[in-house]
Image: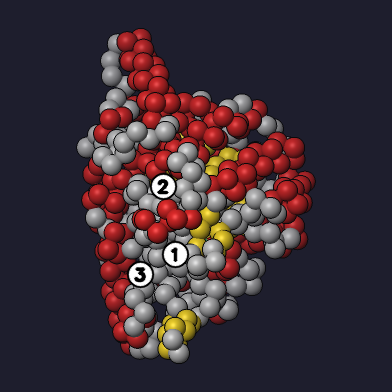
Amino acid sequence: MPLEKQPLSPVREVRDWAPDSWQRKPAAQQPAYPDDDALRRALTELRELPPLVTSWEVLALKRKLADAAEGRCFLLQGGDCAESFADCNASVITNRLKVLLQMSVVLVHGLQLPVVRVGRFAGQYAKPRSADSETRDGLTLPSYRGDLVNGAEFTAAARTPDPRRLLEGHAKSALTINFIRSLIDGGFADLHHPEYWDLGWVQHAPLQEEYQRMVEAIGASVRFMETLAGEAIGNFSRVDFYTSHEALLLHYEQAQTRQVPRHWGWFNLATHFPWIGMRTATADGAHVEYCRGIRNPIGLKVGPQTTPASLLRLIDLLNPDNEPGRLTLIHRMGAVQIATALPPLLHAVRSEGRRVLWCCDPMHGNTETLANGVKTRRFANILAELDQAFDIHAACGTRLGGVHLELTGENVTECLGGARDLTESDLARAYKSTVDPRLNYEQSLELAMRIVRKCGGVVRSAS
Ligand code: PEP
Ligand code: CO
């Protein structure tokens, strides 16, 4: 008998599934390792390493996502498009936490709802690519697939997939999560001390005053509650963070798929919340096969090509028991397509009574390449998609319960627009992403404020 206090679904094994059953299906986006023995050795080692998260945390997050689907809290998921091994350092990690904490304060205050914070971190090291190879000046090499697979530098040595990177990815994820846990346990996320989250390099940010006013209002409420209670209220001194990454490199995910003594079934213990990317979200593909058998909450990216029938089929596979919190549908349509592409999906899921959490990723449908080859996103388009997303959900009688963003606490210039109105000529100044362009601190905070202004009442009142 399992010892879970509130089972989320009936105890049962998933039929015809094993951690390696994905290997019998077509697996898109996997690297071609030149040395099978080296891969086997790395995976044997990886299987023996301790897990990065626990099944208890995974199930706790699932409950929170179930709450978000019901409008009892709001999901804030964000971080780098791709983490890099070189950026596994104290300042990049703390700056990213600071941005997420500041955004969540804005959301908690404005929406009057708890926020579930999920980072795209501690494992977001593998990237899907549109082509397997890249040619420069007559030289063709494998595409860069993220630090978990190969190096970004355009040399044969760097671009050859190297299985030892699987172990380095696990180690860097462990270092990241260890530091985040220590910061939180040490009081970094204490609501009594929002000044801990100030970013050193931010001066005269256009929205700083508005943010400070919110922080002061929250501080006053916390003090008021504590005066009433006659003691410090412990919950205000810590907030939780959960981890997420795209479950792309299936050998890596399989090696960290474990059984635990106190819960039935299999868990991916490399992350709390794996998601299936848009390029691998096919019903007969290996990624869906792998994810259907683990008990973690699963994210599924949904794009403009997704049809109601294909979505319902994916839901059947990934959440056959209609378990609350199990499935988050992350739509990423683009500002131009969302008005036509999203409503049929919302109607289909709603009319079939499928329980899902809807989350908007306003980043990936709005990527564009400038004449000089630089990839960017216009802040105005990101806002426009998000804005429409709230309206469309309200019109369809569904609820938008979260956002999924690519952002960083570094002072980058990768997306155009925002309060400082970054232009094409600003992009060269601090463009650091090796993959997709991210919101910088000011753009992230502005986006959080826009969500609040847009939907202070909508999130809670939609049925
Ligand atoms: C991503 O989230 O970085 C990504 C590649 O997204 P999508 O699968 O939606 O294109
Ligand atoms: Co991306």
Q: Tell me the element at label 3.
A: loop
Q: Name the residue under label 3.
A: 147
Circle 3 residues within 10 Å: few <14, some 14–19, many ≥20 = many
Of the numbered discs 1 and 2, the one sitting upstream in the chain is: 1
Q: Does the residue labelled 3 lie within 8 Å of ligand 1?
A: no
Q: Nearer the viewer, residue 106 or 45?
A: 106
Circle 1 residues within 10 Å: few <14, some 14–19, many ≥20 = some
Circle 2 residues within 10 Å: few <14, some 14–19, many ≥20 = many
Residue at 23 percent of width and 44 percent of height:
182
Is the C-beta separation of discs 2 and 3 under 8 Å? no
Q: Which of 349 and 139 is in front in this view?
A: 139
Position of residue 408 in the picture relative to residue 185 (left or right): right
Position of residue 74 in the picture relative to residue 400 (left or right): left
Q: Mark 1 points at which residue?
A: 435
- The three-letter amino acid code for the residue at tag 1 is Val
Residue at 36 percent of width and 12 percent of height:
224
Q: Mark 2 points at which residue?
A: 440
- The three-letter amino acid code for the residue at tag 2 is Asn
